[in-house]
Image: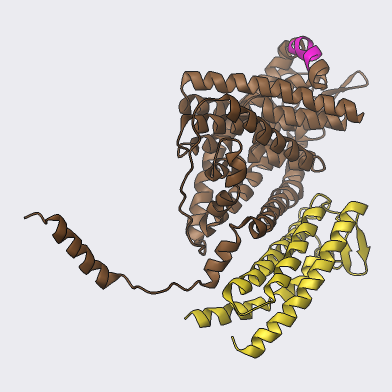
Amino acid sequence: MPLSVDERWDLIDKISKQTVTFGAYKHTLKDAIAELTVKPLTGIPVAIAVIYGFWSFFCDFAGTLFTDGFMVKLFDEHWLPWLQSVFPGGLGNPLYALMVDAGHIENGVLVASDTCFESFGVLTSGLFVPFGVVLWAVVAFYLMFAILEDVGYLPRLAVLVDTILHKIGLHGYAIVPTFLSLGCNVPGVTAVRPLETRKQRFLMITLLAVFIPCGAQIGIMQDLVPELIGWIFLTLAIGYLGFGFILNKIVPGKSPELVMDVPPYQMPMLRNIASKLWIRTSRFLLVAVPFVMLGCLIVGLMYLTGAMDWLAAVFGPLLMGWFGVPAETVAPLIAGFLRKDLAVGMIGGLMEQGIMTTFQVFTSVVLLCIYFPCLATFVMMLKEENWKEFLGSIASLVAMVFIYGGLIHLVGIMLGVA
Amino acid sequence: MDEGEEKFGQIYFAVLGAVALAFGAAELIASAGGGFTWGILDSSGATDPLFLPWRAIILLSVGFFYLSSVKDFAEVHQLAKSVMGSIMIWIVAGMAIWSRIASSIPGEETWFNSLDGFLASYAPPYCPEMFLLPFSLVIVYYIFKAGETEK
């Protein structure tokens, strides 16, 4: 027999008397620390220290220990020379150029590459980029991300940045997809689903696709241009906030508040961290490796057939005139559609050949970040947005690239470095 | 926490806070002027100039955290400030140690470093946070004390 409303309330009273303890709650040390990390005055210095730790670990683990310490030696001193000596055909042979080393021109002579960044073969750059550089960057990133997630710091960071992100039509939760995108844009785009309105999802996806470099790209940047990486991030952050502010004003729709549950701090569990790290890294590699190798193959074929020279001739004036980068940048920009990390690696190759100035390297890397999402992110955008939103994202993206790319060039001219 | 322990904590973290502030100010000046090395103290930012100004900001914050915790030190919200300051030192010093570990394992020309090269990686000079690290560990005692009080 069903209970009446009064009987139900009586039952609730009885249960609560037996299960709930009433009294004044006294704050513990853990509560007090949790409070300190969400109040702006104390939370911001803590956030700086956490991000400092995150970044230091990332640089030393991926850059110093694995990539520079072991992988560069393995690929440049052993793998590349071995392939150069045993692969049939030799320099100038089309298959050799595609698979091992396309070489480069020095004083009118075609010479062999010294590094896997320069060689651009499927078996050299195609393996070095994902396994020599990107893998370690991704492991370092996801390890730290999982620790912060499991400790309970990320929701607090969300509370801390809530006010700033409201200015661009988002709320604190947007820090999660943003942070996740710093590992890989694909899960970052998926993570926008909890945002309430279509406007917020549109804003978030567009900003992620344009201004957030993935862990792979950051790993290569850290390896190639460590002295510029701070400026690159600053430029991207200004773009993220500036264009976010403008898009928020232009795009119709609502940006409601969000009530978030902030869990207590807790000790991370090794098993959880390990399984998260394994799932995210293996998924990343499954996506990255085929695309990097395919990218090397396509770019190599375009060089061999002369398509790249044709594209460089067509787009060269635009690249030089509007963005202030050399026509040779067209090849990385094409490769960047498949994998941005590969494209940054190509810029490294151009840099080593002395084709670009420091400012051009900086502009090219920023352009690579903002000009178009990689193919995997592109597919994910198609999945997460309807056609109207997708076309809107692409239109915003094109406008942002031209405006921001042109602005960077202009600043360079005014400073006398472009 | 008894009165003696509270008094000791107040004096200790006031001094540590002042030292952290002084180191932070020195690092801030160093980051503007290209850095310095003084005996076994290194604020040159030779390995990572990008990190130097951020380290300075963190150290200054640590100093403020410690100093602001001194009044009514035994109260849990005040103690939390000292704990947070110490955690921030552990993060920065921990990363400085991790950086040395990471660079000490691979060799210059060989796969692995020689024993001499390995040991040389841990030789001074050290950054200010590494000097503060052992002194910041005193907070562990107060964390245990606070845990006992909560029980």
> Which quarter of the figure is the N terminus of chain B placed in?
bottom right
Number of numbered labels in the structure image: 0
- Tell me residue A175's x, y (percent): 57, 44
- Tell me residue B105's x, y (percent): 75, 59
When the figure is inspected, residue A32 is found, relative to residue B57, above or below; the finding is below
Residue ID at (69%, 31%): A369
- Tell me residue A232's x, y (percent): 76, 37
Residue A127 shown in magenta = no
Relative to A176, A344 lies left or right: right
Which chain, by letter, is yellow? B
Q: A249 or A405: which is nearer to us?
A: A249
Q: A152 or A41: which is nearer to us?
A: A41
Q: B95 or A37: which is nearer to us?
A: A37
Q: Colour of chain A?
A: brown
Range drawn in magenta: A311-319
When the figure is inspected, residue A344 is found, relative to residue A174, above or below; the finding is above
Would you say residue A45 is visible in this rendering?
yes
Residue ID at (46%, 22%): A386
Residue ID at (44%, 72%): A25
The image's colouring method is by chain
Dominant SS of magenta comes to helix
